[in-house]
Image: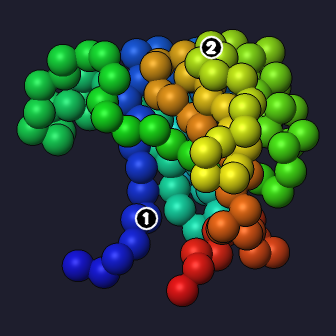
Amino acid sequence: MEQRVTLVTLGVSDLERTMAFYTALGWRAHPSSVAGEVAFFDVGGMVVALWDRAKLAEDSGVSDAGGWGGVTLAHNVDHPADVDAILAEAEAAGARLARTGVNTPWGGYSGVFVDPDGHPWEVAVNPGWPLDDRGRPVLDE
């Protein structure tokens, strides 16, 4: 298996509500989305999908125990002010602010918001992983 991820599907309880949240953050659904069923977002070389949580669990062959699934998504930026601005934007769009922006032990700056379906998003500046001109992290060799 190649070392890459092409698609992340987030299980949602109310597709329209969650679509409204991500749209308020400036995301645009791809035309291949199916109204009322599934939404696709091109996020710079990868796809994030929104799909009914129960259907996703069934399709994945797992039970839906609810609660946190052991995964946090991340969005890296260049400046601490960007972290704070995105956290404020997400909160205004309906997210719960889980952690305000703080200096981290690893020399960065990050905060966390939780989307309407409980998916945590870390927004971070990581000085060890500068972003290229397309916004992708460049890992040290």
The residue positioned 81% from the left and 26% from the top of the image is 89
Circles 1 and 2: CB atoms closer than 8 Å: no
Display coloring: rainbow
Say what secondary structure mark 1 lies in. Answer: loop
Name the N-terminal-most of marks 1 and 2.
1
Circle 1 or circle 2, nearest the eye:
2
Question: x%, y% of residue 107?
Answer: 69, 52
Q: Position of residue 10 (x, y in %)?
A: 42, 36
Q: x and y percent of residue 53 in the render?
A: 32, 25
**Looking at numbered disc 2 in the image, what kind of residue is underneath it?**
Arg
In the rendered image, which residue does mark 2 sit on? 96
Tell me the quarter of the picture where residue 85 sits: top right
Residue drawn at x 73%, y 62% is: 127
Q: Nearer the viewer, residue 25 or 107?
A: 107
The C terminus sits in image quarter: bottom right
Residue carrying label 1 = 6
The dot on residue 74 is: none
In this rendering, position of residue 141 left or right of residue 85: left
Q: Judge from the rendering whether residue 92 lies leftward or rightward of residue 124; answer left or right.
A: right
Looking at the rendered image, the quarter that the N terminus falls into is: bottom left
Q: Is residue 9 above or below residue 94?
A: below
Look at 51% across and 56% down and name the residue there.
47
